[in-house]
Image (spheres, rainbow, N blue to C red):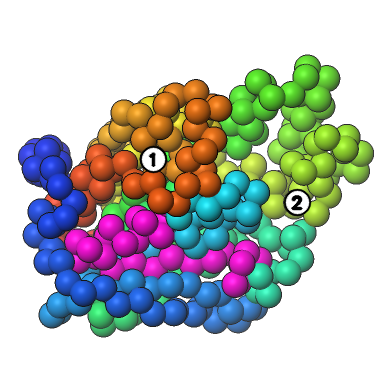
Amino acid sequence: MPRLLYTLLAPLLCSLLPPATGFAAQTVLQRPMDLDTGTGVLHGTLLLPGGEGPAPVALLVAGSGPTDRNGNNPMGGRNDSLKKLAELLARNGIASLRFDKRGIAASHDAGPEERQLSLDGYVDDAVAWARQLRADPRFSRLILIGHSEGALIASLAAPRTEAAALVVIAGSGRPFDQLLVEQLRQRLPPPLLARSAAILAALRNGQTVDEVPPPLMVLFRPSVQPYLISLLAHDPVEAFAAVKVPALILQGSHDIQVGVADAEALKAAKPDAELAVIGGMNHILRITPAGIQEQLGSYNAAELPLARELGQHLLAFIAALPSSPPPGGR
């Protein structure tokens, strides 16, 4: 995508309604959508803008743990971040599919045993969803959009699809163990932090750990260790560098889970990617104060709007994409 075109479009998107992207706003239809993987059925929500002709479609990939299709996590409250993102896209003529990952929410029965889940399985599922969307005559260009851990899943899926572009939002630029140790550093006493680092080192080597201190069980319980081993096998920077289609990195300056340095590491790995750092935006895409305590309420406040600049950059990027995607998502 020409950098000049993106640069010119972004400032023009000063208002999300009405759209200023070249896509016509239409009545939005919501439909359920399922994916039979052969090992279970996954469930999602399709938002369809009205209008004539095929519409661009975005596949939204949620973050880690039990985060559902709407961006909500039972341990963190209801913020509807991905639901609001899908609605924003639909109001601007872009269809979207957001889904519950295997083992999560409505897709629970497709992966009821936690120890059977893996990051690679999630990537396979994202690829299957992408192929289903690409085969649907209602849609034109496919854009993969991953949030948090979903950014890694989308990055790994992109080269296996006919995606026209990739968008990573609040994605890590470090392996999971490095990111987690940093997050735990301010929350755990030194002995538990050291034990966490030792457990992660074993998992990185493909070894499960039987003895987990009770305070760390929520992070390293035996049933989740196979998933962590699969996650640690992938470096987000390497995955992002392998993506050949146009890419956009969106990162908030007040994100307490992933930092601007992570976004800059992704940018360095793929210099032709666009990078937008959104001032004041936190991990769930809201404008908040910088402090952890001041942000906590936003994680359970679905009524808060998304950061306006997030939508401006995202819509400008999609509007500037070539009309026809390269074959094979490469």
Tell me if 306 is positioned left or right of 102 in this view.
left
Q: Is residue 136 magenta?
A: no
Q: Is residue 95 magenta?
A: yes
Vertical placement of 139 versus 322: above or below?
below
Dot 1: few (<14), some (14–19), or many (≥20) neighbours within 10 Å?
many
Residue at 43% x, 65% y is: 98
Residue 224 horizontal/vertical position (percent): 75, 51
Image-quadrant location for residue 260 = top left
Dot 2: few (<14), some (14–19), or many (≥20) neighbours within 10 Å?
many
Vertical placement of 282 versus 46: above or below?
above
Residue 79 horizontal/vertical position (percent): 48, 50
- 156 or 57, nearer to the observer: 57
Q: Residue farthest to the top?
A: 190
- 178 or 27, nearer to the observer: 27
Tell me the SS state at disc 1. Answer: loop
Residue at 35% x, 76% y is: 30
Q: Which mark is residue 224?
A: 2
**In the rendered structure, which disc, 2 or 1, sits on the residue that comes first in sequence?**
2
Residue at 31% x, 62% y is: 87
| Residue picked out by circle 1 | 286
Residue at 77% x, 43% y is: 218
Q: Which mark is residue 8?
A: none
**Quarter of the image containing the C terminus?**
bottom left
Q: Nearer the viewer, mark 2 or mark 1?
A: 1
Q: Which residues are magenta?
A: 81-107
Tell me if 24 is positioned left or right of 210 in this view.
left
Image-quadrant location for residue 189 = top right
Tell me the SS state at disc 2. Answer: helix
Q: Mark 2: which amino acid?
A: Val
- 15 or 68, nearer to the observer: 15
Residue 41 horizontal/vertical position (percent): 58, 79
Q: Mark 1: which amino acid?
A: Arg
